Image (cartoon, rainbow, N blue to C red):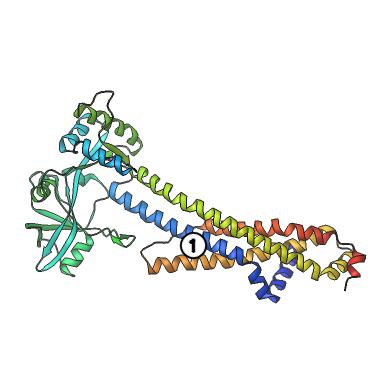
Amino acid sequence: MPFFLEAFRLALGSIWSHKLRSLLTVLGNIVAVTSIIAVVTLIQGMNVAVSDAITSEAGADAFMVERVGIITDEDEAERARRLNPRITLADAAAIEEYSASAEAVMARVEQRGRVTYRGRELERASIEGVSGGYIRFSNYGVEWGRLITPTEVRRRRSVAVLGWAVADRLFEGENPLDKTIKVEDRHFRVIGVSEKKGAVFGRSQDEFVIIPLGAHQKIFGIRRSLSLVVKPQDPGEIERVMEDAVVALRIQRQLKPTEDNNFGLFTSGTILGLWESATSGIFAVLVGVVALSLVVGGIVIMNIMLMLVTERTREIGLRKALGARRRDIVWQILAESVTLSIVGGVVGIVLGLGVALTIDRTTPVPAAVEGWSIVLGVGMTGAVGLIFGLYPAMRAARLSPIEALGKE
């Protein structure tokens, strides 16, 4: 161990005494590691933000029933919208009746609309109508006041729960509870303010108003398709409850065994899977860029180490004449090559984190630092230094002491 520490100490001294040359030598490593750290940090930040938003919307322990499933082809999506019937309260009732393992079924519908209070106006707030089952879902909560009760939903009462941003912009610090707002041209009494959810990619998740489903349909009509969210009694039985829901809906819609489902089912994990598939393409491109940069950086390191071997021929010959073994020479050159490469990796890590955190603070794109990406950056550059430093080290070890001492 003392030998290795001494070799690394000498390597650091050599790097410090030739700062500009060392910087130019590891420039490829710096570019590669900066790229991977910055991109990984940003993608992980986006993954966390998207995951939180999807989980907040659907719930981690629930699944959704939509008129159209997840379709990537626009023509197929248009055909499904044209042929698939609307999701209705009858579909929700069919699932509740058929599946004994379903704890709650919530129907909801969303429409952009105008919300006003004493001259203050939000033109395009999200107006969400919900059925009574929504109170059993953990992703709905209030910071002030209370939620809408199932009785108020059933009786289509004109009550509302505001998103945090809607309450803040309409009331500007005033207590919103028991105040009357207007949704489109209908009056609603505010009974609660939702917990703050934040923003995703700069888009606020708190600009919404929740009202009873019946009241929503009075304002916007009943022709819109509903969305159902189903929560199993046991999260581990979500697959079983999804199968029950498929059977219930096929019976409700009188589908024949040969006919395809005319509805879509998916979980938050399904949506996250699509997102991760998209980001995996970015990773694939990144791997190519990083690999090319590392190969270029490795070739530069190898050339510099060959030059250093030539410059230090007499020193190597003297060490061998004094009893240094071939492996001692190999370790000395390898230590300098690996140290030089890792120094470039560390600089790249610092620059990559700086780029990612700057983007996080100046744009809506979030960043999340991952420890494994830092370890990966150091490990890759260490491996590059080891691989591309091996040939110069072996060449130095094969030098004859007599010929080396005779070099000027």
**Residue 241 pos. (x, y %):** 29, 33
Residue, disc 1: 38
Q: Quadrant of the N terminus?
A: bottom right
Left or right side of 341 for 57: left
Left or right side of 126 for 304: right
* Residue 244 in sight in this render: yes
**Residue 107 pos. (x, y %):** 19, 42
Front residue of 46/133: it is 46
* Residue 375 in sight in this render: no
Dot 1 falls on a residue whose secondary structure is: helix
Left or right side of 20 for 65: left
Across the whole image, how many numbered discs are drawn on residues?
A: 1
**Residue 378 pos. (x, y %):** 60, 60
At x 53%, y 57%, the residue is 373
Residue 387 sits in quarter = bottom right
Q: Residues within 10 Å of mark 1 (few under 14, many from 20)?
A: many
Left or right side of 400 for 143: left
**Residue 188 pos. (x, y %):** 9, 57
At x 40%, y 56%, the residue is 46
Residue 405 sits in quarter = bottom right
Above-or-below relation of 125 to 134:
below
Front residue of 60/76: it is 76
Three-letter amino acid code at the position of disc 1: Ala
At x 42%, y 61%, the residue is 367
At x 61%, y 59%, the residue is 294
Above-or-below relation of 177 to 227:
below
Which residue sits furthest top? Answer: 257
Q: Quadrant of the C terminus?
A: bottom right
Which residue sits furthest front? Answer: 75
